Amino acid sequence: MSWNHWMRQSHRWLSIVFTLAVLANFAARALEPGEPSPWVTYSPLPPLFLQLLTGLYLFALPYFSGARTSRLQEDQ
């Protein structure tokens, strides 16, 4: 399995984890009177941060692979 495939898969799974954390946050706010505990409130942030990193990598991937492809074509 290549690095790019692993990064795409992790980005997809992180999006599922993030969505579930946000849904749990809304459910806790709806079911509990008052403010929920901080771990519930801040639970979506770690997967969101990891999604930021994987998303930036996936965003930049075409630009770097395009530059590499054009350099290979120039050498030939």
Image (spheres, rainbow, N blue to C red):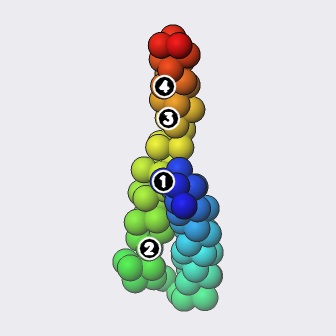
**Comparing labels 3 and 4, the label whose residue is closer to the camera:** 4
Residue, disc 3: 60
Residue, disc 1: 3
Q: Secondary structure at mark 2?
A: loop
Residue 63 numbered mark, or none: none
Q: Quadrant of residue 8?
A: bottom right
Q: Residue at x 48, y 17 (%)?
A: 71
Q: Secondary structure at mark 1?
A: helix
Residue, disc 2: 43
Looking at this rendering, what residue extends furthest in the bottom direction?
A: 32
Residue 68 numbered mark, or none: 4
**Comparing labels 3 and 2, the label whose residue is closer to the camera:** 3
Say which amino acid is labelled 3: Ala
Whichever of labels 3 and 2 marks the residue nearer the N terminus, that label is 2
Classify 23 as above or below 12.
Answer: below
Q: Rounded to the nearest whole Å, what is the CA distance between mark 3 and mark 4?
A: 13 Å
**Comparing labels 2 and 4, the label whose residue is closer to the camera:** 4
Left or right: where 62 falls relative to 47: right
Q: Residue at x 41, y 70 (%)?
A: 42
Image coordinates of residue 54 in percent, x first then y, are 48, 51
